[in-house]
Image (spheres, rainbow, N blue to C red):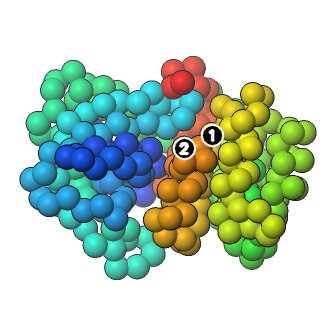
């Protein structure tokens, strides 16, 4: 079994379908045998689920049949609620595609591969949160031979000015912002032909209504605060590798 090193799992978009339920969530702890799906939807153990795992412009969607092997109830920050989906019932072709994704993610943690700078815009009105994010980001990448260039905007108008002026590989958007909410910024971004393909991660302390609003506006992922930063940072590390975009998704 190929596993990503502990604490270096990355975050993937997970489209879930079982019965009449369809949901967009996120997934971590990917191996070629299973994945942990972070979701308030908790199908019973043994339930068959269809998953599509992806990350915008880096990992093309992989569809795989899975079954719920375990349900976890979060007990605090860093221990999210969700379920472990096992790939035991998947076809060999599906499992091979998953193995390929795992191998690419593992390769991104090694040195010696071509890397590029990554430009990230954080739209967050709480300066303490943004400062803590920047500190943790720089600490994570300081010894990894690549750079993530972070810019900050505290409101939608400032974010829009920055988006129109510069290119960003990823935009991280809080929902609760002064004057306008994060969903309005995401919707405007998706409506601009020059910006429509930008990768967007929405974040918030809000519940299911906020998550649905952010995803409906066009966010690729929605992460609940407090964010497990090591998973998000590993995804950023993967995106700094040139081959992530060379073999990327639509």
- Residue at 68% across / 38% down in the picture? 190
Labels 1 and 2 touching (C-beta < 8 A)? yes
Percent x, y of residue 126: 75, 73
In the picture provided, is 25 more to the left or to the right than 47? right
Q: Which residue is mark 1?
A: 199
Secondary element at tag 1: strand
Percent x, y of residue 77: 45, 75
Asked if 238 appears above or below 84 in the picture, the reply is above
* Quadrant assignment for the N terminus: top left
Q: Which residue is mark 2?
A: 220
Asked if 143 appears above or below 60 in the picture, the reply is below
Residue 124 shows which numbered tag? none
Front residue (pair 5, 181): 181
- Residue at 44% across / 45% down in the picture? 12
Q: State how far apart marks 1 and 2 are (Cα).
A: 7 Å
Residue 111: quarter of image:
top right
């Amino acid at each position: 079994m190929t596993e990503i090193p502990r604490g270096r799992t990355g975050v993937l978009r997970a489209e879930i379908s079982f019965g009449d339920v369809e949901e967009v969530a996120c997934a971590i702890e990917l191996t070629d045998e299973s994945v942990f799906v972070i979701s308030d939807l908790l199908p019973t153990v043994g339930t068959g689920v269809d998953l599509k795992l992806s990350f915008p412009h880096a990992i093309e969607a992989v569809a795989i049949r899975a079954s719920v092997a375990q349900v976890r109830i979060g007990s605090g920050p860093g221990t999210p609620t969700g379920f472990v989906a096992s790939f035991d019932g998947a076809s060999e072709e599906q499992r091979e595609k998953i193995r390929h994704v795992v191998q690419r993610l593992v390769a991104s943690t090694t040195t010696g591969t071509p890397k590029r700078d990554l430009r990230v815009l954080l739209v967050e009105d709480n300066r303490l949160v943004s400062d803590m994010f920047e500190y943790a980001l720089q600490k994570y990448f300081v010894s990894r031979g690549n750079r993530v260039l972070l810019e900050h905007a505290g409101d939608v108008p400032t974010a829009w000015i920055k988006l129109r002026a510069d290119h960003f590989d990823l935009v991280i958007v809080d929902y609760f912002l002064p004057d306008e909410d994060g969903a309005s910024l995401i919707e405007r971004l998706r409506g601009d032909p020059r910006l429509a393909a930008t990768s967007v991660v929405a974040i918030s302390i809000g519940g299911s209504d906020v998550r649905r609003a952010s995803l409906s506006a066009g966010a690729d992922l929605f992460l609940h605060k407090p964010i497990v930063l090591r998973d998000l940072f590993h995804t950023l590390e993967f995106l700094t590798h040139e081959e992530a975009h060379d073999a990327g998704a639509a």
